[in-house]
Amino acid sequence: MEIFAIGLNYKTAPVEIREKLSIKEDELQDVLNKLAENPYVYETCLLSTCNRVEVYGVTENLKEAEEWILGIFSSISGIDKESLKKHIFIYEGRDAIKHIFRVSASLDSMVIGEPQIVCQFKDSFSIAKESKTVRHILTKLFDKALNVSKKIRTSTGIGKKAVSISYAAVELAKKIFGDLSDKNVLLLGAGEMAELAARHLASTGVKHIFVSNRTFEKAVQLAKEFGGSAISFNKLFEFLPEADIIIVSTGAKEPILRKEHFLKINKERHGEPIFIIDISVPRNVSDDVNEIENIYLYNIDDLKTVVDKNLQERKVAAAAAEIILEEEVSKFERWLNQLKVSPTIAKVRNFADEIREYQLQKLFSQMPYLNEKERENIDLAMRAVINKLLHRPTMYIKDKAQSEDIDIYIQIFEEMFSRKWDYRKAKEKSKKKF
């Protein structure tokens, strides 16, 4: 049996293909059940995000599994199988294990180190467990993948540095203020990046969010999402002294906030710091605001510099993460290969037990005077002899489990203990009689 990974992602398929194959959360279980209907797919799990739709599983016939999965993908997307094949990747064995580990550790993400994929990976695993489409091998694999992800994040710090403009803004705010729970945020305008920064700030538990926009209805709508308050644009300057963090993103062609506004505010705030993020292009806050003590102004270029620096640091962390990942893939492969030889070892031990039981019955029938304790001691002695005899062969086959030729070693090992040698011996005896 082989572990496989089949699917498409942002590397192999454009967004217009990915969106056609997008699977909603409430549809995942139904799709999983369809995947598991194929007799060649023993275990399976489905990961569906905006950037990837991937099936992980265990099979003994990859070609059959591939055709079945492509058929389901074709049915969902309305794209014929041959067209889909141009965008599909297929990994098996070590390559599949490595890919799954890289996905869970966000080393395969569009933004390396992004945390969302870990939650998505966990959720897909939980749904597969609920649907009973994962068993021993994939359960072990997914548990290991999540442990590896945690190990990489802890030891390399790959997810610590902000790599989006909005995240960088929040990280800078934390550096200036530390705790944000008693801070008020003013969102001026409704640009996409500014709105996203406000969302990130809201998730940190800021005290309150005020929203001001030239279109008041838009301000009301956005403030409602944040549980905040809408401010009429013409009353903006009345509320400026209340704001500890100001995010600016309007379509104005010249600065709205100037040095003179903040000189007055600074007196009212008794020197309490203000953090301003101007994500507008062109800029909506005049440069000279930065000359005022305790006022920190960052524009989109400042934030981009932080992001670029952090991206470089993440790339360094990713290189260290790949080394950890290779080691963990090898460990899992060793476990998987030992799992492969377990049935063979069990067969040999069962064969030895049959011989032991046969010889004991024969001995006890010849020595009926033995009491229960004596019989028990003889049985224990025979078990000890068998264990000692089988110990070295067992260690040998477990060691060879790491070899590329493991299937040949298993065949030889099974042949050595095969019953056919008993039949051959009996056949030779019968020939001698004639």
Image: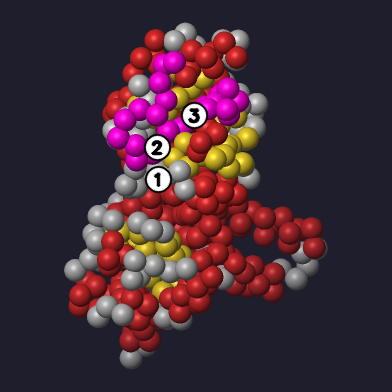
- Comes first in the chain, label 1 or label 3: 1
Numbered disc 3: secondary structure: strand
Q: Secondary structure at mark 1?
A: helix
Asked if 286 appears above or below 196 in the picture, the reply is: above
Asked if disc 1 and disc 3 are in contact, CB closer than 8 Å, the reply is no
Residue 255 counted in the magenta span: yes
User: Start and end of the magenta stretch?
Assistant: 237-260
Q: Position of residue 214 (x, y in %)?
A: 45, 43
Which amino acid type is marked by label 3? Ile
Circle 3 Cα neighbour tier, 10 Å, few/some/many (<14 / 14–19 / ≥20): many
Percent of width and height locating residue 403 = 30, 51
Q: Amino acid at mark 2?
A: Ser
In-front residue for pair 211/93: 211
> What residue is shown with label 2?
249
Marks 1 and 2 sit apart, C-alpha to C-alpha, by 8 Å
Can I make out residue 240 in this image? yes
Can residue 337 be seen at all in this image of the molecule? no
- Residue bearing the label numbered 3: 246
Identify the image quadrant of residue 55. bottom left
Instruction: Residue at 48% x, 13% y: name it.
Output: 263
Residue 69 located within the stretch drawn in magenta = no
